[in-house]
Image (cartoon, grey):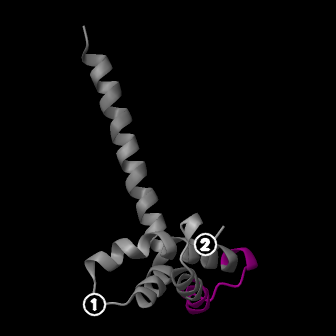
Amino acid sequence: MTLDDLGLNAVRLIAGFSGGAVHALVFKQREPMAVVASVVTGTLTANFLSPLIAHYIPWLGDGACAFLVGLTAMALCQGLVGIVQVRARRAVAEEKASKETRP
């Protein structure tokens, strides 16, 4: 079994790892768990999101794009989770409103 079989790309993983590590250094994360979270989030996010981002900024190479995604992964993931939470709340509210208006 290879990395490709698992949907993993070595270049993106290494670049994302590096981006996550730089994020931990730049934001002076001192707690070991915060550093690990930054690096793991950067690594995995870069692997799976950098192809999407590269589609919109094709002049940026695969490794550079993965590095930037890894560097910004914590904010990207927080933003995406926030969007999902808002949509979920809205769907629940709409469902509740439609049940209340039924005869």
Q: Secondary structure at mark 2?
A: loop
Q: Is residue 65 left or right of residue 22?
A: left
Residue 1, position as x, y percentages in the image: 66, 67
Q: Which mark is residue 3?
A: 2
Name the quadrant containing residue 102. top left
Residue 90, position as x, y percentages in the image: 33, 41
Nearest to viewer (mark 2 / mark 1): 2
Which residues fall within the magenta stretch?
19-34
Q: Callout 1: 10 Å neighbours few (<14), some, many (20+)?
A: few
Whether 80 is drawn above or below 19: the answer is above
Residue at x 57%, y 65% (from the top left corner): 5
- Amino acid beneath label 1: Trp
Residue 12, position as x, y percentages in the image: 51, 81
Residue 28 magenta-highlighted: yes
Residue at x 38%, y 56% (from the top left corner): 83
- Amino acid beneath label 2: Leu
